[in-house]
Amino acid sequence: MDRKEFLSATIALCSLGLIPAGIFESCSKATNNGPTNVNFTVDLNASANASLNNVGGALVVSGVIIIRFSTTEFYAYSAYCTHEGCQVGYNATSARIICPCHGGQFNASTGSVLAGPPPSGLAKYIVTQNGNMLTITS
Ligand code: FES
């Protein structure tokens, strides 16, 4: 396999998602802007979503990190860091969204960059609560 064939095969595998993000920079870049056409619900009564029943809890669903910021406030952002696409997590103590790869930090209320190399904030989604159901949309 020559160089051109290798690159063609690599691009094909990246586009199919068969090469894990992070091995090749070009693979991970595809997810940096976050999911599009987001529209799903989360049942707060389901045991799988129990982390959202406590203030400071967070959960990643379908590439979106959902944060229970207060008793009445939920926020949802892309779970993919805008730097190189690592999955972010929530630190309730600092009220920041943290990227474990290179120290990127985001404001949990707005998704804007507070520290580190991320070039832009996280995509923010709309969270609507109706009883025990959350609806997350683009
Ligand atoms: S991938 Fe998040 S700071 Fe680099």
Image (tube, grey):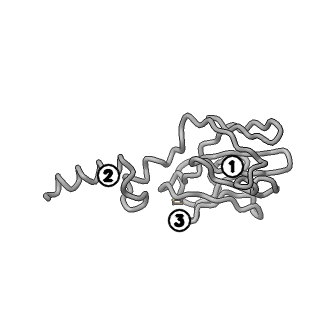
Looking at the image, tell me whether mark 3 or mark 1 is earlier in sequence order: 1
Question: Where the N terminus falls, by quadrant?
Answer: bottom left
Question: Of circles 3 and 1, which is in front?
Answer: 1
Q: Nearer the viewer, residue 98 or 41?
A: 41
Q: CA distance from mark 2 to mark 1?
A: 30 Å
Q: Is residue 26 visible?
A: yes
Residue type, numbered disc 1: Ile
Looking at the image, tell me whether mark 3 or mark 2 is earlier in sequence order: 2
User: Which label belongs to residue 66?
Assistant: 1
Query: Percent x, y for residue 26?
Result: 37, 52
Task: Find out if the beta carbon at label 3 lies less than 8 Å from the nearest ligand 1 atom.
Answer: yes
Q: CA distance from mark 3 to mark 1?
A: 20 Å
Query: Percent x, y for residue 111?
Result: 65, 48
User: Which label belongs to residue 125?
Assistant: none
State the SS at label 3.
loop
Residue assigned mark 2: 13
Q: Would you place residue 44 above or below residue 84 in this image? A: above
- Badge 1: how crowded within 10 Å, few (<14), some, or many (20+)? many
Q: Given the current orientation, which residue lies at the most extreme right position?
A: 71
Disc 3, disc 1: CB below 8 Å? no
